[in-house]
Image (cartoon, helix red, strand yellow):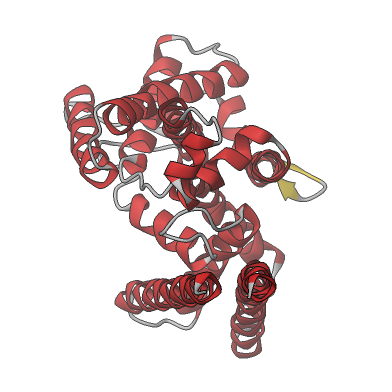
Amino acid sequence: MTSQTAKSAASTPPLLSRLLRAREVSLVALLLIVTLGTAAINPLFLSFGSLKDLFLNVAIIALVVVGQTIVLLMKHVDLSVSSVVGLSAFLTGSLFIAYPGLPVPLALLFGLVLGAALGSVNGLLVAYGKVPALVATLGTLYVFRGVTYAVVHGGQINASNLPPGFLGFATGAVWGIPNLVLLVLTVMIGFGIYLKSYRGGREYYALGSNTEAAVLAGIRVNRRTMIGFALSGAVAGLAGVLYLARFGTVDATAGTGLELQVIAAAVVGGVSINGGVGTLFGAGIGALLLGVMGSALVILRAPSFYQQAIQGALLLAAISIDMLVSRRTAKGWNQGRKP
């Protein structure tokens, strides 16, 4: 009986792993189907200009997805990322107006530090204040947005206020690949390696899988939670600077609604809302899939509300699959524990 229990317990992780891999493979297949199908109707969809615009538009969302994935792995959620993006974009623009010769790397560093500080507020509320992440980040979503409106005070930053070198950073390219896309890919690859291969990254999976077990394993849960939210804020702050470079013009509404797109992309990409499961590769594919679908609907001249409807349908499907996998896994463990 003991051997049967061990066998059942040992067979569950491979089953879950196969299901997750199948989801990522199915996402890639769906991405190819949508892309090739749209190209068959309108060949311009695969033109260099269209693909460049697509990747530039997806890049900002994909970058914010990095931080959101870390938070979701801990079985939390960060709804404040859109406000962090907006505030970071406007304050960076104001900084350029005050200091026109500001180097681009310093602007990126400013966004990182600002975002980390705002994310740390969420971390303090969740880790040490014990406020549910949904409530805490919903509150800071409005607080940070309110601060943005107070700072903007009806004004806006225009491309004419920004240095040409900063604007050229987003539109410039290396071997035809935009700098913005290369930077986002570098961040995603770096964090992907960190989550997979380093102890600190693996601890996020441990927190989301079983917090009690993580404590027994010696993981400092509050500290790790704090760092996770700070990283999410830092990435969103960096995304705000790149948002400014990409669009050139920002006002108090910059980034509004971005949080829902980011969460949808992560969950569709296989990051479990129950924590402890998911990869940045899958989350990135999820962001690209939603971006391709949005562009395809524009190419096909479909009404804009279809894009939101499809995003919602994909999100519901992903959550349903996630719940099904979780229940099957739990059932397998429970059967394995029976004497």
Q: Position of residue 97 (x, y in %)?
A: 40, 16
Is residue 44 depicted above or below 237 in this figure? below
Q: Classify residue 17 as left or right of residue 113.
A: right
Q: Classify residue 163 as left or right of residue 128.
A: right
Q: Position of residue 185 (x, y in %)?
A: 68, 46
Camera-side residue of 148 and 222 = 222
Please tell me in which quadrant of the rendered image residue 24 appears: bottom right
Q: Classify residue 19 as left or right of residue 230.
A: right
Whether residue 213 is visible here, answered yes or no, is yes
Q: Classify residue 126 as left or right of residue 335.
A: left
Is residue 77 depicted above or below 9 in this figure? above
Give the residue displayed 49% in from the left and 13% down from the top: 100
Q: Extreme right residue here? A: 175
Camera-side residue of 69 and 42 = 69
Give the residue displayed 43% in from the left and 43% down from the top: 211
Camera-side residue of 5 and 54 = 5
Q: Position of residue 277 (x, y in %)?
A: 54, 58
Please tell me in which quadrant of the rendered image residue 158 appears: top left
Give the residue displayed 63% in from the left and 85% down from the top: 33
Whether residue 161 is visible here, answered yes or no, is no
Is residue 56 depicted above or below 184 in this figure? below
Q: Position of residue 335 (x, y in %)?
A: 51, 77
Tally of numbered discs: 0
Give the residue displayed 55% in from the left and 19% down from the top: 109
Is residue 146 depicted above or below 3 in this figure? above
